[in-house]
Image (cartoon, helix red, strand yellow):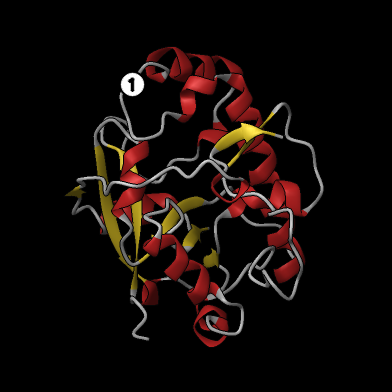
Amino acid sequence: MQFANYVSHYFENEYGPLLNICNLDSEQRNRIIDREKDAETGFNRFSFGEEFFDFRLLADDLLLDLYARKFDERPPRRPFYAVLGDADVVGGIYRDPWKIRIPIDQFGPGELTFMHPDHFHLVSFMKKTGGKKSFGFQLPEDYSESKYPYFGKLLTYEELVEDYHRLKIDQHLDRERENNGWYRYVEAQIWSEPETLRSKYDTAYKVTPETWTHLPSERQNIAGEL
């Protein structure tokens, strides 16, 4: 397989790139909810109000812990999220989606990591409680390390390339694409200082979100009951 040599970071055009909503305080969160809860998007996460923010913050914190264990130091900041290559299905969570592309060779050690399906699954993987609802891809009922070896793995680019097949990431992506599922991407986490990236990679591309099919199963649990 030919691996993409860049990551794509998607964002709401009005707010700009390289932001993390977990950095918002309570008042800012409520303003976002009031403004975005009725937006017509492919999946409106803000329509779930504070519950979504609480779950997202928990997942984000678990990712910070995983980073610290992997690199033996706390990350310098909360990450900014992207995907390996392009996955315009992600644009479906924004009213006016745009993206920037950043070459992988521009990141230093510890500045770029990868996870599949994405970091939201860490909530059930780490056996934490996220409230009444679960967001994102969580552990399937038939979970085992041998069947789903990609769960809970935070990877460098080199590790992703080396273990892509062994961890069965390729098999899951093939199933998602075949079923027109949401999780047809490998999530990237950018840990770099954002101002330099914003100034250096300021060419943005308007995104036409790809369509996807919501399957009513635990495997496709975008926002189902825990």
Image position of 40 with respect to 226: above or below: above
In the picture, the quarter occupied by the N terminus is bottom left
In front of the other: 195 or 105: 105
From the top left corner, tell me how far across and down residue 33 is, in percent. Answer: 47, 17
Q: Quadrant of residue 165?
A: bottom right
Q: In this view, does 179 lie to the left or right of 123?
A: left
Image position of 9 with respect to 98: above or below: below
From the top left corner, tell me how far across and down residue 80 is, in percent. Answer: 48, 50
In the picture, the quarter occupied by the C terminus is top right
Q: Residue at x 48, y 76 (%)?
A: 170
Q: Mark 1 points at which residue?
A: 39
**How many circles with numbers are drawn on the protein?**
1
Q: Is residue 15 left or right of residue 69?
A: left
Image position of 124 with respect to 114: above or below: above
In front of the other: 192 or 8: 8
Label 1: few (<14), some (14–19) or many (≥20) C-alpha neighbours in 10 Å: some
From the top left corner, tell me how far across and down residue 95 is, in percent. Answer: 28, 30
Q: Is residue 178 left or right of residue 167?
A: left
In front of the other: 168 or 68: 168
Q: In the structure shown, which secondary structural element does the residue marked by tag 1 occupy?
A: loop
Q: In this view, does 204 lie to the left or right of 23?
A: left
Q: Which residue is drawn at 55% across and 63% down?
A: 116
Q: In which quarter of the image is residue 19?
A: top left
Q: Residue at x 60, y 20 (%)?
A: 50
Q: Which residue is drawn at 77% across and 65% down?
A: 69
From the top left corner, tell me how far across and down residue 107 is, in percent. Answer: 44, 71
Q: Which amino acid does label 1 sit on?
A: Ala
